[in-house]
Image (cartoon, rainbow, N blue to C red):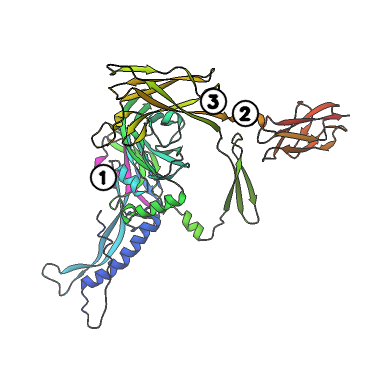
Amino acid sequence: MNNARFFPIERNRYFYGKLLTVRDFEIEQRYHCSKRELLNRLLHGAGVVCGLGVTASDESTLMIESGMALDYQGRELLVPEPVFRKLQMLDGQEELAGRKDAYLCLAYAEEDVEPVNATGAEMGAGRQFDLTRETCRLFLSTEPPEYQSLLEAAGEENVSVLYQSDDLILVLSAPSLTCAGEEFRVRVLVVKNEKTPPLRFSLEGENTFVESEQGRVRLEYRESPEEKRCVYTVDFPLRARALSDTAGQLFPSGGELNVELGSHHYKNYLSVDAGVFLCRDRESCEQRRRRTDGLDRHLLGREMPLYLAKLELIHSAGGVFVGAVTNLPFGQAVSHEEGRSAAGADQMTVTTSVRSLEYWQKPDVKAAYQPSTHGLHLDFGIPSPEQYDYSVAHGTVDLTMPGGIRVNSRIYSEEIAHGLGAGAVDVRLSVEFPDGEEPALLCGSSEVFKSKTSGVTPPWVEAAAVVYPQRGTMRIGLWLHDTVEGNRLRVHYFVQKPERDTDRILSQRRASVAVTPEFSRVKSRGKLQFQADVVGLEDKSVLWSVKEENGGDIDRNGLYQAPETPGTYEITAASGADESVRASAFVIVE
């Protein structure tokens, strides 16, 4: 990208006796202007700073409010007072015939003012101008923006156009970096006309690094019939798997796009170039972003205008009139959030802590706000991974090979006990073969090593096992694809069996709730305080309830309010971590 406007950064070096010419004064101006414009672009970005709202004053006249904007070169665009312009007065109006919509654009402009006679100038250059006035130009464009350049200049990544027609445009963007195990968003820009039927679209494809069902990602959106916006974005939150330092594609095998606009249906399989790198944590993600964050990324779109409004056009009686007006359709506005923080606006301090829960407990979060310090503390309860204990057994079986031709022959062992008793087991087999002076074990397919460069010649065999869970036995078989030397083949088996699972742990856990008092009496409309003691659980919270519909009320702290109707009522306390762990107390209302 050509950044010649900014670089190299040069300034005048003054010394006694230096001859100052027009070139020197131009360098002086360019140095200060370029520095300011570069800082504007890098610190604030491009877009409307304030004002510049567009409304239809009448059916053929637009009113543009006063305001200021920064263009993509960091130059200030200033409209000092409201401007009224008829469509026929704007540049580009000749292109409106037959168009459904157009864009009102704003761009930087200069004009020379105060003409003077230049004495001593070269022949033909005797008339010059004293001043150059910085201004801006309003014009109409019937061509939509180059969406990839527009969104990339706004900081979006992995931009690709999914669908484009006269009535609808869909543009996808996704971050190039995200943290493993954390949520990230995929965004789709929707551009349509006011009279476009309600939209429904979906994009689906295989994915290996996003948490999803059956390894597929589906982005689906249905527009409400009341939706009146013509340009908006739709965010799809996705969560990355816990894979560290892994690169992948959002849709590595392409995606299936389905679009419905009223009775119109469109289906296509398209490739989506959206590469995402999963960093192991936020610090690693930030370090990688800094390494790849160059100037070019922040100086994109140097010649791009600002799109102040999208205009719906009405053609009638040979003329063109303004219908609906959508302000800042592509969100080209400068954010003021950083400025507010720097100015000392109230900031909330957020702190977090994490506590470990049992793997069978539900995750939860508790929030505590401290008004005096304007601080919010979030305490997250995260279940620990489910644990299993395994019993493991190992043994060998010698299988005698048949005589004669052995190609494509099969041999089987007798039924043998694997040693772990009855129940389902996982069996892995390996075939022993000589490799030099030491024996080696073949695990998997020997086809992998059928190469001159491997240096290993395992036998061409396949092994399998049949398990009989009720008897705790199994049979092992071999399939000889080619001739194998010798009379016997030794097969090693490795068997493992889950010895402890979730159900067994839960059945052995001693969790209980005790409520006091267990039995009590109280007057009608009287109050009684109950206490609950949770044993065997880290979470001591309790959920209180009254079993009978008209049996009174009990708050979260166990304070019971008796009803007016006498009777016997049951008070229940359930564990906040596991509602199946509960206890009851009874109260007699007199």
- Left or right: where 208 falls relative to 99: right
Q: How many marks?
A: 3
**Most distant residue in the bottom direction:** 16
Give the residue pinned by disc 2: 504
Amino acid at the residue labelled 2: Arg
Q: Position of residue 550 (x, y in %)?
A: 78, 27
- The span from disc 2 to disc 3 (Cα, nearest Å) is 18 Å
Q: CA distance from mark 3 to mark 1?
A: 84 Å
Of mark 2 and mark 1, the one earlier in the sequence is 1
Residue 59 appearing in the image: no
Question: Disc 3 designates what residue?
Answer: 420
Quarter holding residue 490:
top left
Q: Is residue 528 magenta?
A: no
Q: Report the span colored magenta.
A: 79-105
SS at mark 1 in the image: loop
Q: Are the residues at dot 2 and dot 3 in contact (C-beta closer than 8 Å)?
A: no
Which residue is located at x 42 percent, y 49 percent?
A: 285
Q: On the image, numbered disc 1 is attached to which residue?
A: 92
The answer to whether the residues at label 2 and label 1 have Cβ atoms under 8 Å apart is no
Q: Position of residue 203 (x, y in %)?
A: 38, 31
Q: Position of residue 382 (x, y in %)?
A: 58, 41
Viewport quadrant of the C terminus: top right
Crowd rating for badge 1 (residues with CA inside 10 Å; few <14, some 14–19, many 20+): some
Where disc 3 sits, the SS reads loop
Front label number (3 vs 1)? 3
Query: What amino acid is at disc 3?
Result: Leu
